[in-house]
């Protein structure tokens, strides 16, 4: 029978397997040694991997990944469910594994040449003596739902004008990065940015031109914060903030200097400003390794340094020191 490799001759078992072949839900079953004993037709369609290629083997991972790694059913067979967090970003608490385990994961689907986001449910089957006789894994393609949810999250945390992270997203990211910096005892720096004389710019050139100016400045900031871990956010109005993980004050100064250089290359005309072009004021603050500043405290320091930069004549950056508040 296609899709079945059965060590048992139980008629009831064979009847159940026959029914399983026609389930619309992709399903496969492992024996206690981790070898495939059922690979139904829906699973063939989902993975592009035929039953005869995997029955009696432990090669079922080939349907989902391009390198060997345990599937969720393998973790149950091997008694390694506590390792679920190392392999799956989304999963239930494995404490209830006696009744089954649920997880979700992006899979590369090598045979089909595309990526699918799969919801995975795994349940162990025991005999009357409590011995494990099989593990059943069922799969659901959740790709469309996952993409829709991710897009909604992106929209909820993105600024509509510039495409940067918005204030809500910034607050969440800063909390996460601060917790990581404290845990790892690494530095973390903020660069708070304000567009100088922006109200006169809007008054002179109009709000559509002001919006375009903010978009160009957001591009400058993104180009200057070059590492993948760096985050550029629109804090509100004409204010922006850069989060620079694992960056000491000297590194933040280098980023601020790049911002100034890139902006000067644009030569954004601003006839109502003293220098005749758009400039920025920036305040820099850093959490030292082993420091314990809150998000509110670090932002307050960056804001104090920004105020000092504006008070000193704008078009500059100031690094926060305790004397900055005086």
Image: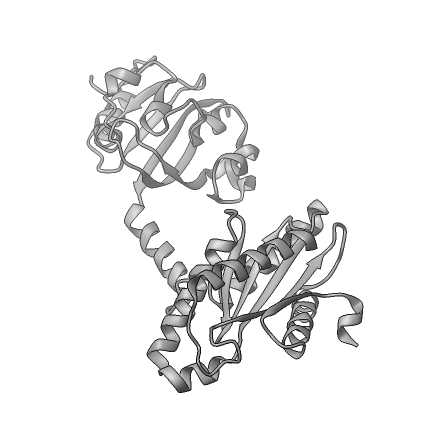
Q: Is residue 215 above or below residue 133?
A: below
Could you tell whether 15 is left or right of 246 in the image? left
Position of 17 relative to 185 (above/below): above
Q: Residue at x 66, y 54 (%)?
A: 188
Q: Please state, as top left, top right, bottom left or bottom right, where the N terminus lies in the image.
A: top left
Q: Tell me: residue 260, above or below residue 145.
A: below
Occupied quadrant, residue 60? top left
Answer left or right for 137 relative to 26.
right
Image quadrant in which you'd find residue 283 = bottom right
Residue 172 spot, x, y in % from top left: 55, 61
Quadrant including the C terminus: bottom right
- Depth order, front residue of 291/217: 217
Residue drawn at 51 percent across, 37 percent down:
97
Percent x, y of residue 320 = 72, 66
Q: Nearer the viewer, residue 95 or 128?
A: 95
Q: Position of residue 249 (x, y in %)?
A: 69, 55
| Residue 91 point in image, percent of width and height | 48, 43
Identify which residue is drawn at 44% across, 63% down: 218
Query: Vertically, is 11 above or below 294?
Result: above
User: Does any portion of residue 37 appear in the rendered image?
Assistant: yes
Query: Would you say residue 158 is visible in this rendering?
Result: no
Looking at the image, how many numbered discs can be counted on the residues?
0
Instruction: Identify which residue is drawn at 33% across, 19% down.
Output: 37
């Amino acid at each position: 029978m296609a899709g079945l490799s059965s060590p048992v001759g139980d008629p009831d078992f064979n009847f159940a397997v026959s029914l399983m072949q026609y389930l619309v839900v992709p399903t496969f079953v492992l024996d206690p040694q981790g070898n495939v004993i059922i690979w139904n037709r829906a699973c063939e369609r989902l993975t592009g991997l035929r039953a005869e290629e995997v029955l009696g083997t432990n090669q079922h991972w080939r349907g989902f990944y391009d390198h060997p790694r345990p599937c969720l059913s393998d973790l149950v067979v091997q008694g390694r469910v506590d390792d679920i967090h190392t392999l799956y970003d989304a999963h239930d608490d494995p404490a209830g594994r006696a009744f089954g385990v649920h997880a979700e994961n992006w899979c590369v689907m090598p045979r089909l040449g595309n990526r699918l986001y799969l919801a995975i449910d795994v349940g162990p089957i025991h005999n009357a003596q409590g011995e494990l006789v099989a593990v059943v894994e069922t799969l659901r393609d959740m790709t469309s739902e996952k993409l829709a949810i991710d897009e909604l999250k992106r929209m909820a945390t993105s600024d509509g004008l510039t495409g940067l992270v918005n204030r809500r997203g910034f607050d969440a990211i800063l909390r996460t990065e601060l917790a990581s910096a404290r845990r790892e005892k690494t530095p973390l720096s903020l660069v708070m940015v304000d567009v100088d004389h922006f109200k006169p710019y809007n008054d002179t050139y109009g709000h559509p031109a002001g919006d375009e100016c903010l978009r160009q400045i957001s591009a400058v900031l993104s180009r200057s914060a070059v590492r993948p871990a760096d985050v550029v956010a629109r804090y509100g109005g004409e204010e922006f903030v850069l989060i620079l993980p694992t960056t000491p004050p000297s590194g933040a100064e280098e980023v601020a200097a790049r911002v100034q250089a890139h902006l000067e290359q644009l030569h954004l005309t601003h006839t109502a400003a003293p220098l005749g072009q758009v400039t920025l004021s920036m305040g820099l603050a850093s959490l030292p390794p082993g420091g314990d500043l809150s998000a509110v405290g670090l932002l307050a320091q960056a804001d104090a340094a920004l105020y000092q930069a504006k008070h000193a004549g704008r078009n500059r950056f100031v690094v926060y020191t305790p004397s900055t508040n005086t």
